[in-house]
Image (cartoon, helix red, strand yellow):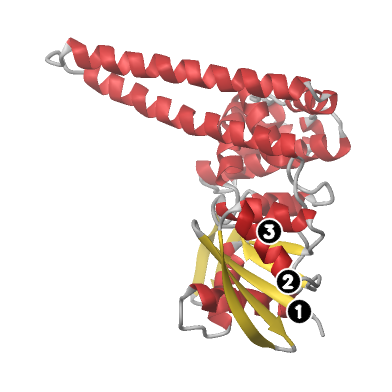
Amino acid sequence: MEEYLGIDVGAKSVVVCVRRGGRSIRTQTFSQTPEGHRALIEHHAGRPAGVVLEATGVYYLDLAVTLFRAGWPVAVINPRSFHHFAKLKLSRSKTDGADAALLAEYGECMKPALWQAPNEDLMNLRDIGRQINRLTVTRTQAKNRLHALRAKSTTLALLIEDEIEGIERLDRRIERLASVARELILQHPDYQQLLNHMQQAKGIGEASAIALLAELAVLPRELKSAQVTRQAGLDVRLCQSGSSVSKPGRISKAGNAYLRGALYMPALSAVCHDPNAKAFYETLQKRGKKKIQALCAVMRKYLTGLWACIKLNVPFNSNLLFSPIHAKKP
């Protein structure tokens, strides 16, 4: 009889529920450590039919990799998907054990797609890219504070000097991480080639290309462009029902915020410097779309082109993304 395991992952412990024959038979807790992960595998001698856990923060990753390398069929699901499943089952309790049992039932009922552990170097590159992203946001905040301090003639010179020192320190940290990322990419000629392909896009420099490569390269190559769009949370969520409810479509944002953020500035630059993107952007506005809606559409187009670079190992070509009809003068 097939066994399904649901694992509720926490910062200090993981709760495992075993489901067999349509019912939960036992629940156990293991420590969130390499020793605890090994104990989990040793305790379940037989290979389960499926193991389901949520992609919650960073805590799931080490466990998912350990189970994958042990040969277990691991499925890492979107927390929102599990949330809707819990609502469907009319679940009222919210405990670690109850969540683990629901995850096991999710695996038995839904048979989610299996997860594959990414290449370790790619994971390191992604971690570096995300740290650069966080430091860049912090630096922007610091520059805004500096601008505000300089706007007052009564501001102490010490405060301005302190803010400048903080910005310079952030510059050094960002450059050090970018240097490590470049060295990591240079060790793999295929990564360097993909980086060069992505930089063919207007608005994508080295920093943006590294951030985008770090997020896209860890995705399974068999994904289609629409699935990658959902990964980034750029898919359009419609809200229409009957004759009285018809709200404007919005992007779902149920995806990778780092990937979505890394696309924003390149798309903003593209609508100024790429003729195809600019024509598409302006056409959407003439049709009544707001600027941010048109920009999100350009982000989706760019993401499709970048995924083609990754999947097909070809240079970015905006001529293949945008219809030439947009560029025609009225």
- Helix, strand or loop status at disc 1: strand
Q: Is residue 319 above or below residue 149?
A: below
Residue 51, quarter of the rendered image: bottom right
Q: Residue 140: give x, y in percent of width and height.
A: 41, 26
Q: Residue 78: give x, y in percent of width and height.
A: 62, 61
Front residue of this view, candidates 75 and 244: 75
Which residue is painted at 47% across and 29% down in the image? 135
Q: Is residue 121 above or below residue 247?
A: above
- Helix, strand or loop status at disc 3: helix
| Circle 3 crowding by C-alpha within 10 Å: few under 14, some 14–19, many from 20 | some
Residue 72 appears left or right of 205: right
Cα separation, mark 1 vs mark 3, equals: 19 Å
Type of amino acid at the residue the image marks with label 3: Arg
Q: Residue 101: give x, y in percent of width and height.
A: 60, 79
Q: On residue 128, which mark appears?
A: none
Q: On residue 3, which mark appears?
A: 1
According to the image, label 3 marks what residue?
38
Which residue is painted at 55% across and 48% down in the image? 289
Count of numbered circles in the view: 3
According to the image, label 2 marks what residue?
44
Front residue of this view, candidates 237 and 330: 237
Cα separation, mark 1 vs mark 2, equals: 10 Å
Cα separation, mark 3 vs mark 2, equals: 10 Å
Q: Is residue 235 visible?
A: no
Query: First in sequence: mark 1 or mark 2?
Result: 1
